[in-house]
């Protein structure tokens, strides 16, 4: 089996993936755990859901353990909460950023681009719940090419970048 050429360095429970076991993808995260979170959707009788965060490899997106130019595609979907209560199920499921979130995201972007090969593509996902997209884009070394930036009501934005120069 060839080495995966797609990296998801903060995969969490892999909710966004159509195939959560895709062998072309290296799934990473800083934690590995199983959680029970409140969930009353879809008529769940006991009001809970079990979430598995099981990366192929533990890693820190601020210091990725790969040589330069290792991947063709990187997806970057970091936590978007900077304020979360101790009982927040959203923070339990998707993580939360610390007080140095600007430095952390700046390093995260820098590392994602470093491990991309020339003309590699970065797909970035961000929810504007607490921090505006504009503030986060100030932390990227490359400008986005295109994406959906349809305002706070739409919530989640997807942006596409290429390491093209
Ligand atoms: C928004 S969630 C990812 C959700 C995921 N894309 C999905 O489809 O379910 C963000 C993840 O980043 C992880 N994370 C937070 N800080 C990290 C770091 N420094 N390095 C790697 N992963 C980190 C959290 O543990 C969390 O699982």
Image: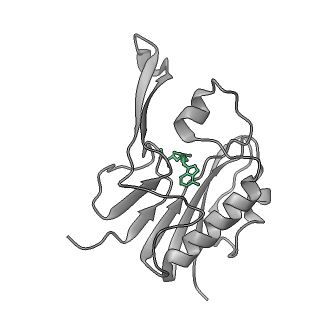
In the visual, does 1 lie left or right of 40? Answer: left
**Residue 135 at x, y = what percent?**
79, 58
In the visual, does 22 lie left or right of 74? Answer: left
Residue sitting at x 29%, y 56%: 22
Q: Is residue 133 visible?
A: no
Q: Is residue 163 above or below residue 58?
A: below
What residue occupies the far bottom of the structure in this picture?
Answer: 165
**Residue 92 at x, y = what percent?**
56, 33
User: In the depicted view, which residue is nearer to us: 64 or 47?
Assistant: 64
**Residue 149 at x, y = what percent?**
69, 56
Residue sitting at x 29%, y 72%: 3
**Residue 17 at x, y = what percent?**
40, 50
* Quadrant of res 83: top right
* Quadrant of res 139: bottom right
User: In the depicted view, which residue is nearer to us: 87 or 126?
Assistant: 87
User: In the depicted view, which residue is nearer to us: 158 or 1?
Assistant: 1
Q: Is residue 81 visible?
A: yes
């Amino acid at each position: 089996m060839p080495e995966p050429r797609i990296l998801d360095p903060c995969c969490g429970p892999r909710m966004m993936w159509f195939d959560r076991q895709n062998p072309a993808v290296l799934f990473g995260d800083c934690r590995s755990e199983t959680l029970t979170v409140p969930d009353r959707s879809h008529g769940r009788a006991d009001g809970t859901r079990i979430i598995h965060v099981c990366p192929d490899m533990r890693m820190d997106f601020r210091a990725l353990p790969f040589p330069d130019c290792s991947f063709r595609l990187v997806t970057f979907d970091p936590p978007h909460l900077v304020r979360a209560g101790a009982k927040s199920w959203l923070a339990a499921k998707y993580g939360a950023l610390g007080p140095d979130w600007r430095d952390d995201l700046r390093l995260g972007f820098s590392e994602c681009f470093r491990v991309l090969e020339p003309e590699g593509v970065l797909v970035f996902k961000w929810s504007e719940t607490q921090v505006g997209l504009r503030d986060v884009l100030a932390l990227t070394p490359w400008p986005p090419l295109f994406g959906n930036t349809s305002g706070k009501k739409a919530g989640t934005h997807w942006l596409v970048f290429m390491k093209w120069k």
